[in-house]
Image (spheres, helix red, strand yellow):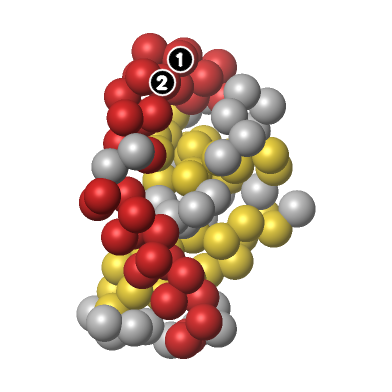
Amino acid sequence: MKGLILLNSDDGFIVQEVDAKMCDYDSKCFIRRDVSNPKHKLWYLVDIDTGVFVCYANTQKQLKEWYLDHKEQLDEIRKSPKYKIKVERFEKAKLVNNYSKGVK
């Protein structure tokens, strides 16, 4: 599957399409592996609604352990007004830049 992430750049926010797989312990997240740096092939848990990385780890097992330890905090964040703003910003970035240019 493909997932979308939000990156911050000098030109503003950039939406990038990445290879991903659905997370089996949180339906609002996907998992991706970043292999751009051969020395640090990290796994990322990404929030689908904001495109923001929730956490990262060296293994999928560590990723799940972190998530289980912080699930309640993540649920509280998702209820906050700041989270809603991040969702709106991500939606705007997806519409404006069509996954290529930045938006301030």
Residue 8 pos. (x, y %)? 30, 68
Residue farthest to the right?
1
Q: Residue at x 62, y 57 (%)?
A: 3
In-image side of 20 versus 53 (left or right): right
Q: Amino acid at mark 2?
A: Lys
C-alpha distance separating marks 2 and 1:
5 Å
The foreground one among 24 and 76 is 76
Q: Amino acid at mark 1?
A: Leu
**Which residue, given by chain and number where applicable, does mark 1 sit on?**
68
Residue 24 drawn above or below residue 50: above
The foreground one among 85 and 3 is 85
Q: Residues within 10 Å of mark 1 (few under 14, many from 20)?
A: few
In-image side of 85 versus 58 (left or right): left
Q: Residue at x 37, y 83 (%)?
A: 102
Q: Answer yes or no: is residue 62 visible.
A: no
Residue 65 drawn above or below residue 25: above
Q: Which image quarter: residue 87?
A: bottom left
Residue 58 pos. (x, y %)? 46, 27
Badge 1 marks a residue whose secondary structure is helix
Q: Answer yes or no: is residue 64 visible.
A: yes
Residue 40 drawn above or below residue 74: below
Labels 2 and 1 touching (C-beta < 8 A) = yes
Residue 26 pos. (x, y %)? 58, 29
Q: Residues within 10 Å of mark 2 (few under 14, many from 20)?
A: few
Residue 6 pos. (x, y %)? 42, 63
* Label annotation for residue 71: 2
Q: How many marks?
A: 2
Badge 2 marks a residue whose secondary structure is helix
* Label annotation for residue 83: none
Residue 5 drawn above or below residue 99: above
In-image side of 74 versus 95 (left or right): left
